[in-house]
């Protein structure tokens, strides 16, 4: 292999890594402001918001489970309690109402949903007997 071809391969690899990093930095989480604007776009917007919140909820749970598998302390624990996709909008809305002064419009939706799950499915929660 000639030195010029090795240099060309390295520069192509570096360019691909930089391009991937740039594309990854362009993908950002939806903010509360963007979610509210989407919801106001009509009936279809409300459906998109519900669908998005379900995805955020599932992603938050999967991310948390991965963190726990890697040794982090569990902050979300279902303990046999029900968590279904249709519950995502009400969990999200309740968290926003309960902590209205905490969240700003530019904060990500994922933060609110993760906090909602941590508050409602806390590991120390005792079910009434």
Image (spheres, helix red, strand yellow):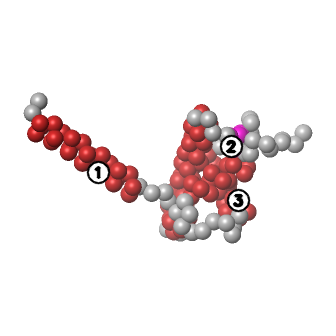
Q: Tell me which residue sits at (24%, 42%) in the image.
A: 13
Observer-nearest of 41 and 100: 100
| Disc 1 to disc 3, C-alpha distance | 40 Å
Picture coordinates of residue 124, whole percent (x, y) = 79, 42
Q: Residue extending furthest front?
A: 3
* 80 sits left or right of 66 in the view: right
Q: Which residues are magenta?
A: 74-78
Picture coordinates of residue 22, whole percent (x, y) = 33, 54
Picture coordinates of residue 68, whole percent (x, y) = 62, 37
The answer to whether one can see residue 65 in this image is: no
* 64 sits left or right of 20 in the view: right
In the picture of the structure, the residue carrying the numbered disc 1 is 19
Q: Main secondary structure of the magenta part?
A: loop
Mark 1 or mark 3: which is in front?
A: 1
Observer-nearest of 27 and 47: 27
Label ID, residue 76: 2
The answer to whether one can see residue 9 in this image is: yes
In the picture of the structure, the residue carrying the numbered disc 3 is 94
């Amino acid at each position: 292999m000639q030195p010029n071809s090795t240099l060309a391969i390295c520069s192509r690899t570096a360019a691909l890594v930089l391009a991937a990093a740039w594309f990854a930095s362009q993908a950002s989480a939806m903010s509360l402001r963007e979610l509210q604007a989407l919801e106001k776009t009509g009936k279809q917007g409300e459906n998109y918001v519900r669908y998005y919140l379900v995805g955020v909820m599932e992603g938050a749970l999967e991310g948390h489970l991965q963190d726990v598998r890697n040794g982090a302390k569990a902050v979300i624990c279902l303990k046999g309690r029900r968590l279904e996709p249709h519950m995502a909008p009400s969990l999200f809305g309740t968290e926003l109402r309960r902590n209205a002064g905490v969240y700003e419009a530019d904060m990500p939706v994922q933060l609110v949903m993760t906090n909602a799950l941590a508050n409602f499915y806390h590991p120390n929660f005792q079910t009434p007997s």
